[in-house]
Amino acid sequence: MTGGPDLRVRLGALELAHPVINASGTYDVLAVAGEHGLGAVPFSCYVPKTVTPEPRPGNPPPRITETPSGIINAIGLENPGIEAFIADLPRLAGLPVPVVISVGGARPADYLTVVGRMEERLADAGAGPLPPIAGYELNVSCPNVAAGGLSIGADPEALYELVSAARPLTARLLI
């Protein structure tokens, strides 16, 4: 036997070497690459920190606290916004694994803005090298400001509407 059992899995049309994927924002591949190179990614797919249309500063500290039964975090989706994210994306061009972009927003239209803008950039072949973008993770655990703070993921109808609106924007994976 060479290398152990076959752990390949499929996520839609995407075939992954094994089922281990990082949760969005929990692994800074560029920080690790500084020490070990981009080839040292231990995941079969990389999910960067959630990106929103506009920059977000996140919540003020404290953002993380321990409890007797675990850890609670309230990071607040701190990110540079879609334009800065796109500008930085070529730094991931040497990744040996596919990338799934985590998309967030304060309202459903924000998700569509990010997916649409990413697709525009991906269609612009002359804009430089990019990592292999396999699809999008719709971070629907974010509070929907337009719905009084209710998470889109907690409302089946709102979730259906969001996915239905996002699907025509991309042929890539939507999770």
Image: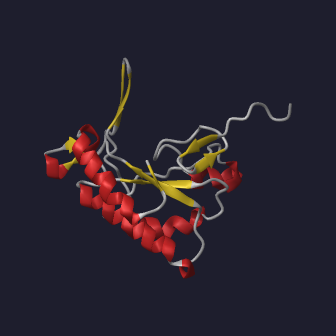
- Comparing 15 with 118, the one in front is 15
Q: Which quarter of the figure is the N terminus placed in?
A: top right
Residue at x 38%, y 19% (from the top left corner):
69
Residue 148 on image: x %, y %:
13, 45
Residue 138 on image: x %, y %:
38, 50
| Residue 103 placement: quadrant | bottom left
Residue 115 on image: x %, y %:
39, 63
Residue at x 56%, y 68% (from the top left corner):
90
The answer, for residue 111, to whether it is visible in the render is no
- Comparing 136 with 172, the one in front is 172
- Residue found at the very far bottom of the displayed protein: 126
- Residue found at the very far right of the displayed protein: 1
Please state if 126 lies on the left or on the right of 139 as rendered.
Answer: right
- Comparing 56 with 14, the one in front is 14
37 lies above or below 59? below
- Residue found at the very far left of the displayed protein: 148
Please state if 43 lies on the left or on the right of 110 as rendered.
Answer: right
- Comparing 93 with 166, the one in front is 166
Residue at x 53%, y 45% (from the top left corner):
27
Please state if 95 lies on the left or on the right of 175 as rendered.
Answer: right
The answer, for residue 174, to whether it is visible in the render is yes
Residue 48 on image: x %, y %:
49, 52
What coloring was used for the rendering?
secondary structure
- Total labels: the figure holds 0
Residue at x 58%, y 52% (from the top left corner):
29
| Residue 3 placement: quadrant | top right
